[in-house]
Every structure is written in structure tokens, then in C-alpha cells.
Image: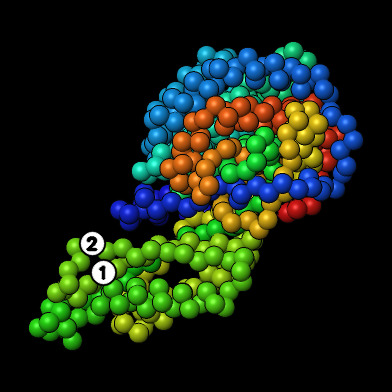
Amino acid sequence: MQSQEDDQQFDCAHIDMRPCCQEILKMGRPPSYEHDVQTLWRPEVLDTIKKAVDGLSDELRELSLKIHDHPEIMFEEKFAHDTLTAFMEKHGFEVTRHYLGMETAWRASFTHSKGHGRVIGVNSEMDALPGIGHACGHNLIAVAGVGTAIAIKVALKKHNIPGTVVLLGTPAEEGGNGKGILIEKGGYDGMHACIMCHPSVGPKNSTVLGTTLALTSINVEYTGHTAHAAAAPWEGRNALDAAFLAYSSVSMLRQQIKPTHRVHGVVYGDNWAANIIPDKSRMRWYIRAPTWNEVQELRARVLKCFEAAAKASACELKIELGDVNYELRQNPVLGENFVSAAGEGLGMEIGTVGEPRASTDFGNVTYFCPALHPGYGIPTVPDGGNHTPAFTKAAASIEAHKVTMSVTKALAHTGIRVLDDDDFYKEVKDSFTASQ
């Protein structure tokens, strides 16, 4: 897996975003799992969690709005880093700032009954989008992670459950593969499972367990030779022609790829002028498919388009393969507890989803350990979905906060069951092993 330095060689990379959200929620029958949920596990623990989250709600609302009002793009989440770590310290967590050498990553942990029990991981995302702020609701994801971790802490102490909760502040979901970098650095080592959530467009008080597309990026650079475009164009080798040939070739390739596959890219250049044959052009591409294996197969076909364009234009070609986001693999055993807590325990509607249309670096976490990433609906206007200014406004609404608190409770209930229920965790682990 490539590090963020590979992408930062292009000045344009910091504005090149990919959608990370779950697709639009559609109401229907709840997702089916291998095991039927008969009754809510330990309702008294859920009651403890409810009281803890309700008691925190006003503080979490204030925290969410602070982050919403100070949007920071990937790897620049300094205000969020400082604000969230101070909050976790105030609530009795052991905090590590600038975790594993990443300036805006952080870790907050709490252990009850040291030396015993499992470790449940939780994620808080923080980054915003250039120009439109928190249009993917990461301010809500941040406080959902905070609330989940603190509620688990409260329940561990009250019910004398041994275990550890670790909350990671994960930078750069929007194009920087922050979680992938943290995995490589050992940030997820020792976790028995990991959980988080994500807002999207959907019916009121609804949640859903869907998947996402696997994704990889490609940086392309063509090098030709400058010449006067009128006086001696035959002396030039046109790098812009190479980029256009490649773009057209990929566009024609799309007719022959599956409906579930996606290829999309942009062309960049510096100091181009109409009377100069361009000697440099750059492109950035994303390739997505339902599985990583399909992404690799499609990437091989796309690379041939780039190579053919280089030959046709007599330009030199440089290709750098970027980060990998694997498809999201929801752990079905974690999922069935979440559905039980959200539906039976909290009265939320459980949705179903269609084909995946987006990607997230949390997919890499689901390959590393058993993990869960439910989506949930917040109210917004028509055509006001994720990555729009309307969604930025929606992410600051009181309605969005309320449903975030409900999902937080269901996540905390699921997380603490990992720590307390040996049979449950064995099923979680066995399911994860079987999916590998």
C-alpha cells in the first residue's frame, strides 16, 4: 500500500477528493444474517449506555459544531486534533497526540481491570472537503466515536466488565488513506474488533449496513518536447495530445466494462499556452469495483490505454500506482447485534441498500480485523447528498445530531458485547476468519 507521499508529488492532489459516503438509504426488510437475533443482549447494559450518551449529548453537540465551524482538509485537522484530544483527557482517557508520527492522528484509551479482557477499537474521522466544509458529516463521525468510547467506559466500570476501549482519531479519509497508513504503522494492532459509523441521505431515524466499492488511484505523467505551435510544431512532442488520447481511450473502454465498475479521472497542466506545444501533462484516475480483485483486472486494461497513448504521441510515460481502499466487509455477527440494539432497543428503522457506489479507507480496517461501519440517514434537501453544500448545512442540524446519538448508543452496545461475551466474540472472530 502506498503512503501519502506518492500522491503529494502533484500540487493538485490536495483538492482531488473521492466520495466516501454510503449510498442513499432505501427502506425495506432488514439485512439478513447467518444468525437470527431473538432478544436484545443485556438490556441493562444498553440502559447504562443510553443514560451515558444522553448525559453527554449537549457536550457532544457543542463539540460537533466546533469542528463543523472549523473545517480542515486531509492531514490538516489540527484544530480537530487539539479539541478532541482535550475532550478525551477531560473524560479520563489516556491520550497520545500526534500518534505514530502522524501530525493529526491521535489515540485515546481506557482500561478497566488491567491485564484482562479484549480491546474494542472505535474510529473518529475529522477531515472536511475543500471549499464546502463538512459536506460528508465527519463532524458527526467524530463525536459519534467520542460518545461511543465514553459510553463503553461508563458501562465497563458500572458493570465491572474487564476490557479496553481505544478511540483513534483518523485523519485524511477524504483522499489520503489515513486508516491505511495507520494500519501499516501498527495503529490497529491488538484490536479484537473495530467500529464506526457514517451519515448519508436517508429516511428519518434510519440506519443501514451496506458495503462500498474497492478503489485504487493512478497518477500519470506524460513528457514530450516543447516547440512553437505555429513556427515549428513538427519539432514538438505534444504531452497534452497524449493525455487526450488516454482520456478518450478510457472513455471508449467504459462501454466494455461492467455496470458496477467505475473509472474517472482529470487532466492537469502548468503554464500551458496556446502557442506552445505542451511538454508536460498529468492525470489522476480512480478505479473502483465491488472487489479488489475486480479493481486489479480493470486497472490492467486502463494501463494499456495510457501506454498506447504514449506510443501514439511519442511521449514518455510515468505511472505511479496509488493507495488501495478495499471494499467494506461488514462483520455479520457484529451487524446482527447492532441491528438488534438499533431496532429493538432504540426504535430505529433498519434499511437496505442497493449497489455500492462509494469507497472508504475503513474497508482496509475490515480486512485487518472484524469491523462494523453502519450508515445512517440525516435529513437534507433533494439533490443535497454527501459532498454538496446542502449536506454541510444538514450535518450541523439538531436532527442530524439526534440520530447520531442513537447510532452511537447501538455502536457502544455492540462494542461492549465484544468485551463481555466470550461466545459472541468467538462467532465474530470465526466469521471474520471465514471471510478471509
- Most extreme residue toward the bottom is 234
Residue count near mark 1 (Cα–Cα under 10 Å), binned few <14, some 14–19, many ≥20: many
Q: Residue 342: x percent and y percent?
A: 74, 33
- Which residue is labeled 2 in the image? 270
- Three-letter amino acid code at the position of disc 1: Lys
Identify the residue shown where x is 40% and y is 34%. 71
Q: How many numbered discs sit on the rendered protein? A: 2
Q: Residue 180: x percent and y percent?
A: 54, 47
- Which residue is labeled 1 in the image? 280
Q: Quadrant of the C terminus?
A: bottom right
Identify the secondary structure beneath mark 1.
strand
Identify the residue shown where x is 36% and y is 53%. 13
- Most extreme residue toward the left is 231
Residue 232 lies in quadrant: bottom left
Name the foreground residue: 207 vs 309: 207
Mark 2 or mark 1: whose residue is earlier in sequence: 2
- Three-letter amino acid code at the position of disc 2: Asp
Residue 356 lies in quadrant: bottom right
Answer left or right for 281 relative to 55.
Answer: left
Any mark on residue 6, and which? none
- Inspect this view and state whether residue 123 appears: yes
Identify the residue shown where x is 51% and y is 49%. 383
Identify the secondary structure beneath mark 2.
loop
Answer left or right for 257 relative to 431.
Answer: left
Q: Residue 152: x percent and y percent?
A: 68, 22
Q: Are marks 2 and 1 in contact (CB under 8 Å)?
A: yes
Classify 192 as above or below 114: below
Name the foreground residue: 268 vs 183: 268
- Most extreme residue toward the right is 38
Classify 418 as above or below 365: above
Residue count near mark 2 (Cα–Cα under 10 Å), binned few <14, some 14–19, many ≥20: few
